Image: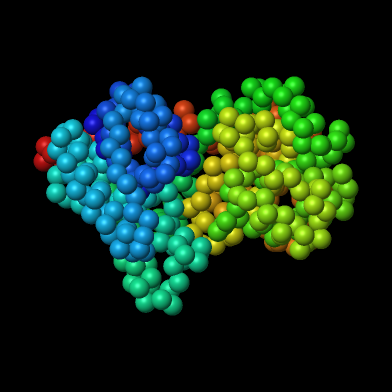
């Protein structure tokens, strides 16, 4: 199939490199002709554009980047949508595109129009309840009439996308159940594909234990220090204060505990919060790691922790770090009411789920740590294979393409 993949996120962004390109490489290898239209941040494009272009060319993927407009709010997005529409139509005609695959809502605005105008098959890869995320994350204040109008506009569009798409991709079963509970949406064709991970790259089998030992020494960690980790950025959704509260309960039971933050965020952000919690600065380590260093840094820890704000929009959330950590053989402690997180950890028995952010719930999870550590890394890796295999994700996308192609042929013959 000839596919145009439209993304408002850039391929030079970390997200594009971890959650777009790997899938498209796999689909290209299966024989699909893939073209990408994306909005790139100028600085990232200057730094990594050539490298990404070469990577895509090596995998027979055409890339049509345009520049993202950073400001002013709202007007900048309107400009980007206009540019995406113009460029996408040009690509569709030039490349004889058959399927337009749209990542999230901004891209879907273009995809739905292309379906109507050029009779293409439209795949709505929704990624999450985007409009609700903007509200839950305090990005859009509904008391502001402009943001209220934009929110209502996208909620109407969300229903249009779901009804008009030839296929819908959801990150979670939780979101699929939610959509199918809406009146008139029971028959929407939804395929669940979570944020998959490269389970060969993030594999405990491929981690050099000698390098882990050397890094442990370089960071001043003692042999009997018990390390828990947090992986990823801190910001809108991740509950730093509650994670530090958990760490205090852990330290009360394991005094030699250290908390390692593997993040590109400024160390001062974490350190200031730790001071307010009266946590010894020496027990907090904040390190930035390049992608190829992440498995080794994660492997310093026995347990990994993350808490996510359990808002409505998080029904559709699939944390990328889940598959990566499990594949590295590291048990996870996190909270429920986020996507399919609780169901996956409980099914695999490779983590602990907290339902309330209270000292008593933290203590229950701390007491489960010995039993979690008794399980071999292979058990965690197998659960990652079951739920987060990139190979399986590519196979599911391929099946979606085949299904919409058949549906399109039938429609064309009637």
| Colouring mode (rainbow / by chain / secondary structure / one colour) | rainbow
Q: Quadrant of the N terminus?
A: top left
The one of 372 and 97 positioned closer to us in this rendering:
97
Left or right of residue 411: residue 46: right
Compared with 258, 296 (above or below) is: above
Q: Quadrant of residue 301?
A: top right
Identity of the residue drawn at 25% across and 48% down: 84
Which residue of the protein is positioned furthest toward the left in this rendering? 414
Total numbered labels placed on residues in the image: 0
Along the horizontal axis of the image, is 251 left or right of 352?
right
**Residue pictured at 30% horizontal, 40% vertical:** 65
Residue 94 falls in image quadrant: top left
Q: Is the C terminus in the top left, top right, bottom left or bottom right quadrant?
A: top left
Is residue 369 shown to the viewer in this render? no
Residue at image position (19%, 48%) is: 86
Residue 127: x and y, percent?
42, 49
- Is residue 333 visible in the rendered image? The answer is yes
Horizontal side of residue 232 vs 29, given as left or right:
right
Provide residue 318's location: percent of width, then percent of height.
52, 47
Percent x, y of residue 332 = 68, 43
Examine the rendered structure and indicate whether residue 110 appears above or below residue 159: above
User: Which residue is rendered at x = 42% and y = 57% of the image?
Assistant: 130
Q: Position of residue 231 (x, y in %)?
A: 63, 43
């Amino acid at each position: 199939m000839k596919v145009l993949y439209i993304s408002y996120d850039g391929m030079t962004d970390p997200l594009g490199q971890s959650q777009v390109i790997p899938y498209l490489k796999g689909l290209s290898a299966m024989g699909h002709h893939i073209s990408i239209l994306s909005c790139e941040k100028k600085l990232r494009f200057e730094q990594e554009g050539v490298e990404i272009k070469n990577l895509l060319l090596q995998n027979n993927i055409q890339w049509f980047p345009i520049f993202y407009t950073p400001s002013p709010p709202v007007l900048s997005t309107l400009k980007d949508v206009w540019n995406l529409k113009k460029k996408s139509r040009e690509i569709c005609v030039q490349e004889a595109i058959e399927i337009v695959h749209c990542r999230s809502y901004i891209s879907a605005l273009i995809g739905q129009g292309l379906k109507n105008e050029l009779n293409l098959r439209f795949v709505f890869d929704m990624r999450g309840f985007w409009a609700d995320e903007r509200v839950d994350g305090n990005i859009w204040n509904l008391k502001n009439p402009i943001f209220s109008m934009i929110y209502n506009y996208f909620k109407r569009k969300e229903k249009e996308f779901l009804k008009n798409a030839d296929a819908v991709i959801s990150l979670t079963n939780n979101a699929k159940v939610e959509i199918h509970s809406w009146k008139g949406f029971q028959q929407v064709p939804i395929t669940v594909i979570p944020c998959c991970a490269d389970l060969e790259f993030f594999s405990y089998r491929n981690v050099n234990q000698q390098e882990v030992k050397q890094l442990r020494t370089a960071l001043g960690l003692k042999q009997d220090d018990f390390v828990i980790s947090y992986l990823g950025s801190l910001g809108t959704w991740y509950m730093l204060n509650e994670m530090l509260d958990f760490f205090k309960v852990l330290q009360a039971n394991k005094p030699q505990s250290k908390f390692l933050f593997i993040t590109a965020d400024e160390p001062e952000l974490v350190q200031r919060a730790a001071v307010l919690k009266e946590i010894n600065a020496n027990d907090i380590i904040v390190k930035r790691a390049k992608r190829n260093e992440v498995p080794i840094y994660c492997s310093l820890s026995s347990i990994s922790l993350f808490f996510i704000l359990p808002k409505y929009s998080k029904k559709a959330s699939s944390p990328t770090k889940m598959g990566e950590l499990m594949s590295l053989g590291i048990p996870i402690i996190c909270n429920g009411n986020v996507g399919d997180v609780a169901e996956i950890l409980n099914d695999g028995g490779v983590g602990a789920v907290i339902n309330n952010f209270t000292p008593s719930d933290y203590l229950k999870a701390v007491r489960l740590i010995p039993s979690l550590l008794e399980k071999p890394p292979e058990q965690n890796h197998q659960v990652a294979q079951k739920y987060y295999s990139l190979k399986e994700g590519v196979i599911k996308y391929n099946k979606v393409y085949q299904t919409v192609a058949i549906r399109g042929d039938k429609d064309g013959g009637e």
